[in-house]
Image: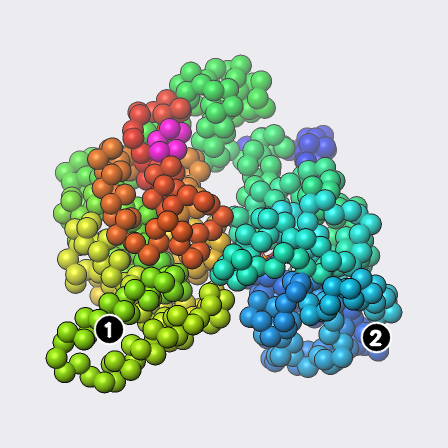
């Protein structure tokens, strides 16, 4: 790499489109600990001065790690919150404080119940007021913030609409605490908590932009790939009411704290050659060439020196001497990712293939976070691995029991009831059990919590579907494993933290199978986070088993879940599917009847899972073709994780 001169550094500064200071951490846990530590120090400093610290707090998934760390500091290091006053950003309206989704309940559950804060110092907008009292209430909320001396440290998450608090697009810079309407996208995202779309409130009480902007210090957090796009618009876009978080660009003391996945959308990662000097690794060169090919709409082998020079990539050619050499190199690299032998091609030269040729018959363990991710994300590869004679095992990591509609569960209960009437001597206990379950399913509205029996039925429904899908792909029953990881079994969308027992269950299966290949969901964009947690469990299990002799022969391949695909430059194995294989894969997905049409947690996408899978796999094939590679019907993509 060429040395960077001062002049070039200056050029970097000038070309950087970032208008807010961004601190990037490898993961949200580390980032959250850092913010929590800063808050703890600020509390202690105020204590020494005999003063109060005023905290502005947020809810949602983003601040949970910070609260967890603050609780740890309180419990293990004795930090007192006696001098802390809090103001929460917002609350749904109307909502009862007891409702599972209320922010009052959230704050108590995740923070207040575990620290020594004086309850009189807690302020959370009141979602129970009569409409005519809301204006006065908001005015008094503002007054209380002022009386407390203003907010010292404000925590903010960011919504996909760019909202901070519930200041949705259209909010004014001078807005104060008030009643607002929630944006359609925000309501959609809230379905994961309310389950029933109709139950999501239309309104909320929120601190205004101006209230937030008066805080001394602001931390804006964003974790995960699904925040990457809005983060880029916030950090790099102009100030605009259509992305209210951009108003923060006018604040003198904001820190944007993000994990790598959320940062990935920033220009410095997406197209770093547009910002400044690059360290041209093989992956970055591939990325740049793919970008250029898409930009000028030419296959890679047709790119010319002037295409590179005219698009800020002259440096890259210098690195590789000519565009001709570079084009061939990248083209061959991509070509080498394509294989119809996902378990390795026996007796073939494997020096340029994604998988090893030996052993010819591999033991393969495919982890599926939910019961249908295996077929949705890698159904075609699954079918091939079995057909090519590998010993394939599938492990369903969670029961997926919360994602079955009550009316579907009721059908199964009534089936067993009616079938039971035909069995002579069916026990009265069983009859009573079924009757009670039937009543509870009939009476439950979609937002009330589930009891153990309905969850058991729903879990069994999904188990049967998973079994049918795996059998369709050719697996014998003894190679189908249900892990029912405990972290998932809360009966609601809020999951327990991962514990060693989740990891132990996973380790036990790995030790039993000693796989040569492990496939797992490397999905950072899962809106429920379950995929991410399941991946961490696999990582932890493999890490803890690293001294086992078989581990050195074990390769970990990551597929992406139903929401995103790997970027082309990230793909290390591309498995092409014929039209017939696409059709077979669709049939495997159809085995998951409870997830068809409109499952309880559809995410933001209106398409059914099989449609998303096919669109995604076809899009990858089109992307390969446009780069000048062979044309296929569809492609499933994987990335190897070196652990
Ligand atoms: C919550 C709040 C919202 C959230 C935002 C991000 O009090 O004010 O602005 O911070 O919707 O939510 P999560 O963190 O769940 O992605």
Task: Indicate whether 420 appears above or below 161.
Answer: below
In this rendering, the count of numbered labels is: 2
Residue 524 image point, x, y percent: 47, 51
- Residue 437 shows up from this direction: yes
Task: Indicate whether 194 appears above or below 437.
Answer: above
Majority secondary structure in the magenta region? helix
Residue stretch rendered in magenta on the structure: 618-623
The image's mark for residue 51 is 2
Residue that extends furthest to the bottom in the rendered view of this protein? 428
First of labels 2, 1 by sequence position: 2
Asked if the stretch drawn in magenta spans residue 580, the answer is no
Q: Quadrant of residue 513?
A: bottom left
In which of the image's four quarters is ligand 1 placed? bottom right
Q: Decide which of 103, 562 is in the foreground and name it.
A: 103
Which residue was labeled with disc 1?
417
Asked if the stretch drawn in magenta spans residue 622, the answer is yes
* Secondary structure under the numbered disc 2 in the rendered image: loop
Name which residue lies at 39% across and 74% down: 440
Residue 406 image point, x, y percent: 38, 65
Q: Quadrant of residue 606?
A: top left
Position of 486 with respect to 448 (left or right) is left
Residue 557 image point, x, y percent: 33, 48
Name which residue lies at 74% across and 64% down: 131
Q: Decide which of 261, 354 is in the foreground and name it.
A: 261
Q: How is the image coloured?
A: rainbow
Task: Indicate whether 466 appears above or below 496.
Answer: above
The image's mark for residue 334 is none
Name which residue lies at 26% across and 38% down: 582
Position of 20 with respect to 347 (left or right) is right
């Amino acid at each position: 790499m060429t040395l960077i001169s001062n002049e070039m550094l200056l050029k970097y500064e000038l070309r950087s489109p970032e208008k807010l200071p961004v601190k990037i951490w490898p993961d949200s846990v580390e980032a959250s600990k850092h913010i929590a530590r800063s808050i703890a120090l600020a509390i202690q400093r105020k204590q020494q001065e005999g003063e109060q610290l005023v905290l502005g707090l947020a809810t949602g998934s983003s601040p949970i790690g910070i609260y967890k760390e603050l609780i740890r500091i309180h419990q293990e290091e004795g930090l007192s919150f006696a001098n802390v006053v809090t103001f929460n950003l917002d609350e749904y309206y109307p909502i009862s404080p007891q409702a599972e989704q209320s922010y009052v309940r959230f704050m108590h559950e995740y923070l207040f119940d575990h620290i020594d804060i004086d309850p009189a110092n807690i302020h959370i907008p009141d979602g129970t007021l009569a409409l005519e009292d809301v204006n006065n209430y908001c005015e008094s909320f503002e007054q209380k913030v002022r009386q407390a001396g203003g907010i010292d440290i404000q925590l903010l998450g960011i919504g996909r609409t760019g909202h901070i608090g519930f200041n949705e697009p259209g909010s004014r810079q001078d807005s104060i605490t008030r009643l607002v309407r929630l944006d359609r996208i925000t309501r959609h995202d809230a379905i994961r908590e309310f389950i029933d779309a109709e139950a999501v409130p239309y309104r909320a009480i929120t601190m205004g932009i101006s209230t937030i902007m008066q805080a001394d210090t602001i931390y804006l957090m964003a974790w995960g790939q699904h925040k990457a796009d809005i983060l880029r618009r916030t950090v790099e876009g102009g100030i605009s009411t259509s992305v209210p978080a951009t108003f923060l660009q006018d604040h003198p003391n904001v820190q944007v704290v993000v994990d790598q996945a959320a940062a990935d959308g920033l220009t410095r990662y997406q197209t770093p050659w547009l910002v400044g000097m690059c360290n041209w690794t093989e992956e970055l060169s591939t990325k740049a060439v793919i970008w250029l090919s898409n930009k000028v709409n030419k296959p890679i082998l047709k790119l010319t020196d002037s295409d590179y020079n005219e698009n800020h990539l002259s440096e890259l050619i210098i690195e590789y001497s000519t565009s001709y050499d570079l084009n061939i190199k990248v083209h061959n690299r991509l070509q080498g990712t394509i294989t119809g032998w996902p378990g390795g091609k026996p007796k073939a030269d494997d020096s340029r293939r994604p998988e090893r040729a030996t052993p010819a018959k591999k033991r393969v363990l495919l982890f599926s976070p939910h019961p249908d991710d295996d077929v949705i994300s890698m159904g075609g590869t699954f079918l091939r691995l079995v057909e090519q004679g590998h010993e394939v095992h599938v492990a369903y990591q969670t029961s997926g029991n919360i994602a079955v509609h009550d009316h579907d569960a009721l059908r199964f209960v009534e089936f067993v009831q009616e079938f039971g009437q035909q069995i002579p001597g069916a026990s009265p206990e069983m009859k009573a059990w079924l009757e009670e379950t039937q009543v509870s399913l009939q009476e439950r509205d979609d937002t009330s919590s589930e009891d153990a029996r309905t969850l058991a039925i729903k879990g069994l429904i999904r188990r049967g579907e998973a079994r049918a899908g795996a059998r369709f792909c050719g697996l014998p029953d003894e190679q189908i494993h249900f892990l029912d990881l405990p972290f998932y079994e809360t009966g609601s969308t809020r999951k327990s933290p991962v514990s060693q027992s989740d990891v132990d269950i996973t380790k036990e299966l790995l030790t039993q199978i000693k796989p040569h290949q492990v496939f797992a969901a490397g999905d950072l964009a899962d809106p429920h986070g379950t995929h991410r947690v399941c991946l961490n469990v696999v990582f932890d299990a493999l890490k803890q088993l690293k001294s086992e002799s078989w581990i050195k022969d074990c390769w970990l391949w990551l597929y992406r879940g139903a929401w995103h695909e790997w970027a082309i430059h990230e793909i290390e194995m591309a498995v092409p599917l014929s039209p017939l294989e696409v059709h077979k894969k669709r049939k495997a997905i159809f085995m998951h009847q409870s997830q068809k049409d409109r499952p309880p947690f559809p995410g933001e996408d209106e398409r059914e899972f099989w449609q998303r899978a096919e669109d995604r796999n076809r899009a990858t094939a089109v992307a390969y073709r446009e780069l000048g590679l062979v044309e296929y019907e569809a492609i499933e993509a994987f990335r190897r994780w070196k652990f």
